[in-house]
Image: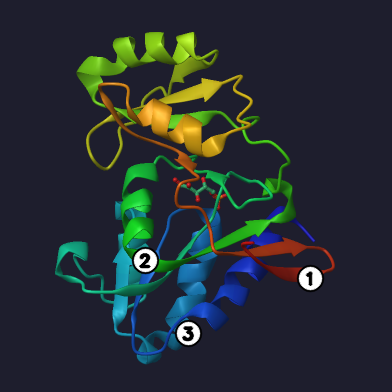
Amino acid sequence: MTQDELKKAAAHAALADVVEGSIVGVGTGSTVNHFIDALATIRDRIIGAVSSSEASTKRLRAHGIEVFDLNGIESVPVYVDGADEIDGGFAMIKGGGGALTREKIVAAVAERFVCICDASKRVEVLGRFPLPVEVIPMASSHVARELRRLGGEPKLREGFVTDNGNLILDVHGLSITDPVATEMHINQIVGVVTNGLFAARGADVLLLAASGGVQRLSAR
Ligand code: 5RP
């Protein structure tokens, strides 16, 4: 199976986690695009969605799925999203698509985070994938200096502006053995909007697709 077929398999498996009659939290990325397409097949059984990016909002609406403003929503039982890396404790690096801040906001509101991945995303230690950090534009040099002090090598994502009008620094060379501490530490740097470590609030369920099928794993 190709990587895209594995992404599609994980995305389809997540339909079982969708709570009927609810508003579904929807992430961003190529795996989530498969989930949105699958969600469209049961759109009459949900109220609608809250979205983590302009791209996902556009795709949801194109399928006739209503997208709600998160501020007007009382509860989001399930949030479905992909990851760039996920470790054994279900801490993740996210933000390869640059939607990390809105993803983290929707994940914070959701009761359960269902992560959908192909098996290549599963790692022992986070950090081979460069850690995305969303920064306020005027602070990018300051934040880059602080990230170098932590041992990382930040690179500005060229030609990219987030949905929030900010920049992304992709931090190479980190070996993240304490994801919660690193997440908190980087978020304390003045000018950082958020970083792509989802450790303080990791995934609750991992749907991991390999050629043998989709494994459903729960957080310990
Ligand atoms: C976007 C994300 C995505 O979930 C992550 O980049 C995985 O993407 P894909 O499903 O395309 O492999 O965090 O900001």
In the image, 155: left or right of 67?
right
Quadrant, the N terminus: bottom right
**Front tag of 2 and 1:** 2
Residue at mark 1: 213
Horizontal and vertical percent position of residue 50: 30, 67
Estimate the spatial distance between the alpha carbons at disc 2 and disc 3, rounded to whole Å. Answer: 22 Å
Q: Kindly tell me whether mark 3's CB lies below 8 Å from ligand 1.
A: no
Amino acid on which disc 2 is placed: Ala
- Tell me which residue sits at (56%, 28%) in the image: 130
In the picture as drawn, the residue positioned furthest to the right comes out as 212
Horizontal and vertical percent position of residue 158: 40, 22
Q: Which mark is residue 179?
A: none
Secondary element under disc 2, as helix, strand or loop, is strand
In this figure, what is the number of numbered marks? 3
Secondary element under disc 3, as helix, strand or loop, is helix
- Tell me which residue sits at (57%, 21%) in the image: 172
Q: Is the residue marked by circle 3 packed among few (<14), some (14-19), or many (20+) residues within 10 Å?
A: few
Estimate the spatial distance between the alpha carbons at disc 2 and disc 1, rounded to whole Å. Answer: 27 Å
Horizontal and vertical percent position of residue 41: 47, 85
Amino acid on which disc 3 is placed: Thr
Nearer to the camera, 69 or 177? 177
Residue at mark 3: 41
- Tell me which residue sits at (50%, 61%) in the image: 32
Residue at mark 2: 110
In the image, 211: left or right of 21?
right
Q: Mark 2 or 3 closer to N-term?
A: 3
Estimate the spatial distance between the alpha carbons at disc 1 and disc 3, rounded to whole Å. Answer: 22 Å
Amino acid on which disc 1 is placed: Gly
- Tell me which residue sits at (58%, 33%) in the image: 178
